[in-house]
Image (cartoon, rainbow, N blue to C red):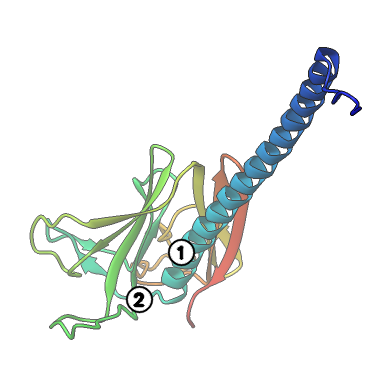
């Protein structure tokens, strides 16, 4: 005579379900933490790439600055390099090395400016140097979450907050196209604090 098959009791089923539920919750929590960590790492990588690109563009423009002033839309002369805390464009300069892959009939010089607006750093550039009329610049967003963008200029052995200098030591008329020896840029980010670079100019 065969023994009757013994099934699971209700208590055993409840215990098994409870153990399974605990294991499922633990596995889900671990998977969620892994996904959150991965997303945070990817976001930090994207942020790092954006900061590096912004600093690279600043370095590239400053290190290729040339002593070539321009005339603005009103025909007024503007120095080769302008900067200061009170200016809308914290840094404006003429640079060389403007790529021309399409072979357009234009110079390889470019007028660029950097402006901080609503926590965003913009790079502005004009298609011509001497404008001769109202020409709107084109803008590229370089970086967001920027609290402050500051510049300083090394003139011989002295640091200045504004450029060009208002006067020279020998009381002669200052050269508006004279370049500083170096430019110090400082970016204060909401998440990473202050980043400072000291960039020498050509010559």
Residue 145 to residue 20: above or below: below
| Mark 1 neighbour class, 10 Å CA radius: few under 14, some 14 to 19, many 20 or more | some
**Secondary element at tag 1:** helix
Residue corresponding to mark 1: 58
Q: Is residue 177 visible?
A: yes
Q: CA distance from mark 2 to mark 1?
A: 17 Å
Q: Quadrant of residue 29?
A: top right
| Mark 2 neighbour class, 10 Å CA radius: few under 14, some 14 to 19, many 20 or more | some
Residue corresponding to mark 2: 67
Which residue is at a point 45% across and 72% down the rendered structure image?
60
**Mark 2 or 1, which is nearer the eye?**
1
Classify residue 25 as left or right of residue 6.
left
Q: Name the residue at the left extreme.
A: 133
Return the x and y of residue 38 as percentages of the image width and height. Answer: 63, 48
Residue 143 to residue 63: above or below: above
Which residue is at a point 49% across and 48% down the rendered structure image?
149
Return the x and y of residue 162 as percentages of the image width and height. Answer: 45, 54
């Amino acid at each position: 005579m065969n023994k009757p098959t013994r099934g699971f009791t209700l208590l055993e089923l409840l215990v098994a379900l409870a153990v399974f539920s605990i294991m499922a919750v633990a596995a889900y929590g671990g998977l969620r933490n892994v996904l959150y960590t991965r997303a945070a790492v990817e976001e930090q990588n994207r942020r790092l790439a954006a900061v590096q690109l912004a600093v690279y563009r600043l370095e590239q423009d400053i290190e290729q600055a040339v002593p070539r002033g321009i005339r603005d839309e009103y025909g007024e002369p503007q120095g080769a390099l302008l900067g200061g805390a009170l200016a809308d464009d914290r840094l404006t300069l003429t640079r060389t090395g403007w790529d021309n892959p399409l072979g357009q009939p234009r110079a390889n010089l470019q007028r660029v400016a950097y402006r901080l607006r609503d926590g965003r750093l913009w790079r502005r550039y004009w298609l011509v140097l001497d404008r001769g009329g109202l020409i709107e610049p084109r803008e590229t967003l370089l970086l967001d979450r920027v609290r402050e963008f500051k510049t300083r200029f090394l003139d011989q052995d002295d640091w200045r907050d504004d450029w060009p200098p208002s006067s020279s030591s020998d009381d002669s008329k200052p050269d508006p196209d004279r370049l500083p020896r170096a430019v110090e840029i400082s970016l204060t980010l909401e998440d990473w604090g202050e980043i400072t670079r000291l960039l020498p100019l050509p010559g």
